Amino acid sequence: MAEEWIVRVQGKEYGPADIDTLREWQREGRLLPENEARNANADVWGTAAAIPGLFDIGAVVPTAGRVTQPPLQTQHRSFGQILAETFQIYRKGFFQFLGLTLLVLLPSVCSQLMTALVQTAHASDGDLRVLAGGGFAFLMFVLSIAMWPVYIAGIQMLTAEIASGRRPGLIAALNEAVRFWPRVAALCIFVYGMFALIMLFGLVIAGIALAGASSLLLVLFALALLVLQVWMFGRFFVNVLFWQQSAVLENAPFVDALRDSRNMAYSGRDLPWFQRPLWRGAFIASLWFAFVLVVTLASEWTTIHHYLNELATTQDAQTLLQQLTQAQQARGFDISAFVPNVLQKILQPLVGIAFVVLYLDSKIRLER
């Protein structure tokens, strides 16, 4: 019978595991030479470096063992390794993350489908079926919004559990996530509300620029306001970069979560700029925004091209607006745009997972 070992990582024991399993943990960075280890049949602890054939081998043999894995050694992760670990965690917990996604996706899909049916119905506006359909679509939209805090908290918990080598169940994660609903919901209203106000400020700037197109003074004033808006957006983005992790994983109250998020974002001043949590978080968010932009443009390119042609040929702004509105209503439910949107929602947990892995990495660095 092959020898098996038990290892102790961050105060928790894992195993028994055979040499092939230990080699996989070592390859993935989960097991370091200084971690404690002992033979499963002995009580004397040593270090993993003393296990024969583990850290002095030239090749790594993968394993299909089902023993619990030790937590990630995220303090040793480069940015590329953080991204790789993100996809690994998503793969391991795919069905759990999919279940969380369906909490917000299914009500949203029902709302969209019912709205499209109502818009294309030939019944009069006072028809009870149209009114019932509109009411159902609105209720599904509200349900989707209400499930969003549970979705956010669930992603944090599932990621932390999988990163620690455990196999959490979806129901258990949901029961735990519901407890955080009031706090996460309040933070969602504050954070997303502030971003909405900043974007509204941008629309005001655009209106000033259009109104004062012939005045150099107003144009300069609009540019100054635009610089202020960019600064406000960037500063607020930094301050709330890790609010989800602070609120859920650290169980921090409303104000403490925002303060801890800001402190985490500005930590690592002694590191090269590309290793600091701020820039890593910004790059992760940029990758996701770029993906969303590509998916959106690809799915909506025909419509965008049509709108641009209408804009180039129509001189009357009111007529253009009416034509665009009529075209949108006539379009109804578009499967070509629906499928990429669903794919985007299914992959969206990757962003939350990446920020949790980055948070764990940054937190360990901060505590060292």
Image (tube, rainbow, N blue to C red):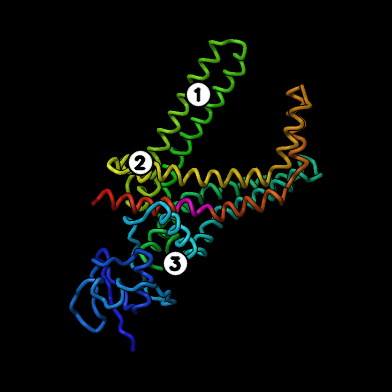
Residue at image coords 41%, 75%: 61
Please name the residue shown 36% across and 72% down the image: 58
* Neighbours of disc 1 within 10 Å: few (<14), some (14-19), many (20+): some
Q: Sort mark 3 into few (<14), some (14-19) or many (20+) by Cα contacts within 10 Å.
A: few
Q: Does label 2 or label 3 sit earlier along the sequence?
A: 3
* Location of residue 214 in the rendering, given as x and y in whole percent from the top left corner: 62, 11
46 left or right of 126? left
Closer-to-camera residue (84/203): 84
The quarter of the displayed image where residue 297 is located: top right
What whole-number distance in Å separates the C-alpha atoms at marks 2 and 3? 38 Å
Range shown magenta: 348-352
Residue under numbered circle 1: 226
Q: Position of residue 271 (x, y in %)?
A: 30, 44
Q: Which label sits in the foreground, 2 or 1?
A: 2
**Mark 2 surroundings within 10 Å by alpha-carbon count, few (fewer than 14), some (14 through 19), many (20 or more):** few
Q: Residue furthest right?
A: 122
